[in-house]
């Protein structure tokens, strides 16, 4: 059984990874920006792999406290990277969970591949881009086997209401109104089931894949689709503000598909769990 050190184990994705994958997990439980504690954790035992998820994620929360977000998302990653480099016996494989937010949101329906120039559209994306660049530079210098997964959109009923789907769901079920008006949600995003994200990380681990990979469905979903789904389930009528300009953040996932992975589940697999 693989010995896996994991940060961010109590988050939505971390909890799912621990539940679904048959690794021997050793979660890091302190503040990721506490370098001494990070070093103590890494030196407790030898690890076969490290999965680094710890981060402040919702863009709303990052915008509220960018200083703290940068401290966790960038400085925390820097601490982990520096501490791994110091180890005498290094993990065989290290996975860093990045995000599609390191890319610029497009005005045209054009898929984004891993060679696209990074240009974050949010402060959250900026913190992850800085962490990526530091990790790439240091691990390449030391020839450490790293993998960066740029994860596109996903949804889960346990997410905070600062995330799109939980917020829309809450607004629909907590109103007695039969007609609900929506503004500024006619945009396109790439939603992948959280179950498929876990599968992708496990797949990349088994292949000991190195480099940067987009982890997305490769298909576009209009955000109206989510609102319509919930409205239909709760017998509400949805009316959407008409807009002429759309935005797109869709993955070109051909790189990971070429080595044998492909999605199994669709967006509705996760949306149905909100209802059930």
Image (cartoon, rainbow, N blue to C red):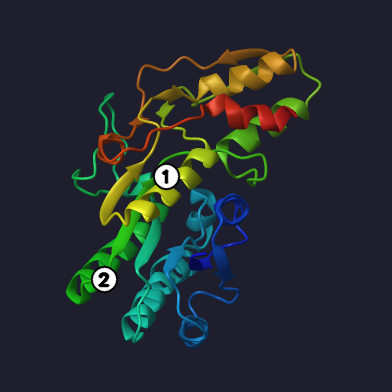
| Quarter of the picture holding the C terminus | top right
Indicate left or right for 67 with 29 as reference.
left
Indicate left or right for 248 with 73 as reference.
left
Q: Nearer the viewer, residue 212 or 99?
A: 212
Indicate left or right for 241 with 180 as reference.
left
Return the mark for residue 81.
none
Return the mark for residue 200.
1
Residue 155 in sight in this render: yes
Indicate left or right for 81 with 270 as reference.
left
Mark 2 falls on what kind of element?
A: loop
State the residue at coordinates (54%, 55%). 61
Q: Nearer the viewer, residue 86 or 159?
A: 86
Mark 1 falls on what kind of element?
A: helix
Label 1: how many Cα within 10 Å (few below 14, some 14–19, many 20+): many
State the residue at coordinates (52%, 50%). 58
Residue furthest right in the image:
176
Label 2: how many Cα within 10 Å (few below 14, some 14–19, many 20+): some
Q: To which residue does mark 2 refer?
A: 144
Q: Nearer the viewer, residue 171 or 116?
A: 116
The percent position of residue 200, horizontal first and vertical second, equals 42, 45
């Amino acid at each position: 059984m693989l010995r896996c050190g994991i940060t961010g184990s109590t988050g939505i994705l971390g909890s799912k990874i621990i539940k679904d994958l048959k690794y021997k997990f050793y979660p890091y439980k302190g503040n990721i920006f506490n370098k001494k504690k990070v070093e103590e954790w890494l030196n407790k035992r030898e690890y076969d792999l490290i999965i680094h998820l710890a981060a402040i994620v919702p863009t709303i929360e990052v915008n509220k406290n960018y200083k703290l977000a940068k401290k966790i998302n960038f400085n925390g990653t820097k601490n982990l990277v520096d501490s791994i480099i110091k180890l005498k016996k290094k993990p065989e494989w290290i996975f860093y969970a990045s995000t599609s937010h390191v890319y610029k949101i497009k005005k045209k329906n054009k898929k984004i591949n891993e060679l696209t120039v990074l240009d974050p559209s949010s402060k959250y994306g900026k913190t992850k881009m800085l962490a990526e660049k530091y990790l790439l530079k240091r691990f390449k210098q030391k020839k450490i086997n790293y993998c960066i997964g740029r994860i596109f959109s996903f949804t889960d009923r346990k997410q905070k209401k600062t995330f799109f789907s939980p917020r829309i769901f809450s607004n629909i079920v907590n109103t007695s109104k039969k007609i609900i008006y929506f503004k500024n949600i006619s945009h396109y995003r790439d939603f992948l089931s959280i179950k498929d994200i876990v599968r992708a990380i496990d797949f990349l681990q088994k292949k000991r894949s190195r480099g940067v990979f987009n982890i997305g469905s490769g298909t576009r979903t209009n955000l109206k689709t989510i609102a319509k789904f919930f409205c239909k389930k709760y017998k509400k009528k949805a009316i959407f503000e008409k807009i002429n300009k759309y935005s797109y953040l869709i993955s070109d996932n051909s790189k990971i598909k070429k080595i044998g992975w492909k999605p199994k589940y669709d967006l509705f697999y996760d949306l149905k769990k909100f209802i059930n």
